[in-house]
């Protein structure tokens, strides 16, 4: 409504018709019990159209009030348009940079799987607390036979491997439920069967699996922004010369299980201190 009023002479009623789905969608989604930001994706283009019309209408605010087209206020308003657009572009690029460089490690680490076929055919890739950042089976090379979840405390229902013998997509296997409760069948009970492991090490007081040098070796690691320990301003937007220093980073790791004899040798030689192999 505010958009239509601010640009009523230049765009109305066409603008109101174009952006009306925004109000309809917001009203409909507001009635839903469960709300997420991704539910707004369908109306993002219309929000951009509405915002552009408001910026373009800046001078009209003063043109309506001052009949003289040469009003100093109208000239200032016209000059504000490129400044406003420039600010939006800079802020958007800053936000995008922070998101890609702060949280882009999972996609890059999964791509690194293709360089480790020497792990052997039939390998099992295990994912624990990082199940929600598992991108897709398209990132998993053919030498990995399964991707399995391990129990790290999550009590919700997780995806199961597709089993066409149960009826395909039309079936409702017994391990599914309508309450999103975890099934005891969704986790791999024997963690010793894991050949590879994805792990996020946020340097918390409790130990991570990757610190056990007698069991795991780090194949690749990348910095991952620790949102809990980083200031809101610096983690949300890239500020040159400050972003890397003000934020706190953990490590997103790809780990591989060591043979028993090799693991013991490595643990003894390192004196119990973890080493990290990073990949750029």
Image (spheres, rainbow, N blue to C red):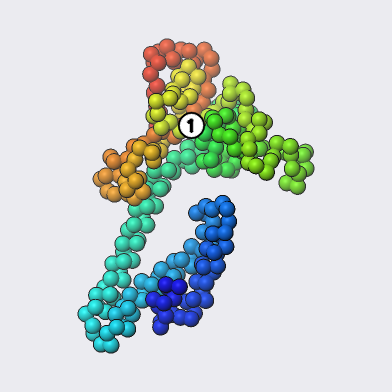
Residue 238: give x, y in percent of width and height: 32, 49
Q: Residue at x 73, y 46 (%)?
A: 169
Quadrant housing the C terminus:
top left
Relative vertical location of residue 66 with respect to residue 125 in this rendering, above or below? below
Residue 34 is left or right of residue 51, and the answer is right
Q: Quadrant of residue 10?
A: bottom left
Residue 123: give x, y in percent of width and height: 60, 28
Residue 255 is left or right of residue 69, and the answer is right
Residue 80 is left or right of residue 15, and the answer is left
Q: Quadrant of residue 65?
A: bottom left
Q: Which element type, helix, strand or loop, lies under badge 1?
A: strand
Residue 162: give x, y in percent of width and height: 69, 40
Q: Residue at x 25, y 45 (%)?
A: 241
Q: Residue at x 37, y 57 (%)?
A: 92
Residue 230: give x, y in percent of width and height: 34, 40
Q: Nearer the viewer, residue 57 or 100?
A: 57
Farthest-out residue, bottom: 67
- The residue that label 1 is drawn on is 199
In the rendered image, is residue 275 in sight? Answer: yes
Q: Residue at x 40, y 21 (%)?
A: 274
């Amino acid at each position: 409504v505010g958009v239509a009023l601010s640009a009523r002479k230049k765009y109305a009623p066409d603008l109101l018709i174009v952006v009306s789905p925004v109000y309809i969608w917001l009203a409909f989604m507001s009635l839903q019990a469960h709300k997420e930001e991704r539910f707004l994706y369908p109306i993002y283009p219309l929000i951009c159209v509405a915002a552009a019309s408001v910026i373009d209408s800046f001078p009209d605010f003063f043109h309506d009030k001052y009949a003289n087209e040469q009003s100093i206020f109208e000239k200032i308003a016209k000059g504000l348009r490129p400044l406003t657009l420039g600010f939006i572009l800079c802020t958007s690029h800053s936000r995008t940079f922070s998101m890609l460089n702060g949280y882009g490690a999972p996609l890059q680490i999964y791509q690194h799987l293709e360089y480790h076929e020497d792990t052997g055919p039939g390998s099992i890739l295990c994912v624990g607390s990082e199940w929600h950042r598992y991108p897709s089976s398209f990132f998993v090379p053919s030498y990995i036979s399964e991707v399995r979840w391990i129990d790290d405390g999550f009590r919700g229902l997780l995806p199961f491997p597709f089993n066409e013998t149960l009826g395909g997509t039309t079936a409702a296997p017994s391990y599914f439920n309508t309450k999103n409760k975890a099934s005891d069948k969704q986790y791999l009970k024997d963690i010793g069967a894991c050949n590879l492991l994805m792990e996020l090490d946020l340097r918390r007081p409790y130990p991570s699996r990757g610190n056990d040098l007698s069991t795991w070796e780090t194949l690749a690691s990348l910095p991952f922004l620790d949102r809990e320990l980083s200031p809101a301003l610096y983690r949300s937007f890239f500020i040159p010369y400050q972003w890397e220093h003000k934020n706190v980073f953990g490590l997103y790791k790809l780990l591989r299980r060591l043979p028993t004899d090799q693991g013991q040798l490595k643990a003894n030689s390192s004196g119990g201190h973890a080493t990290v192999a990073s990949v750029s």
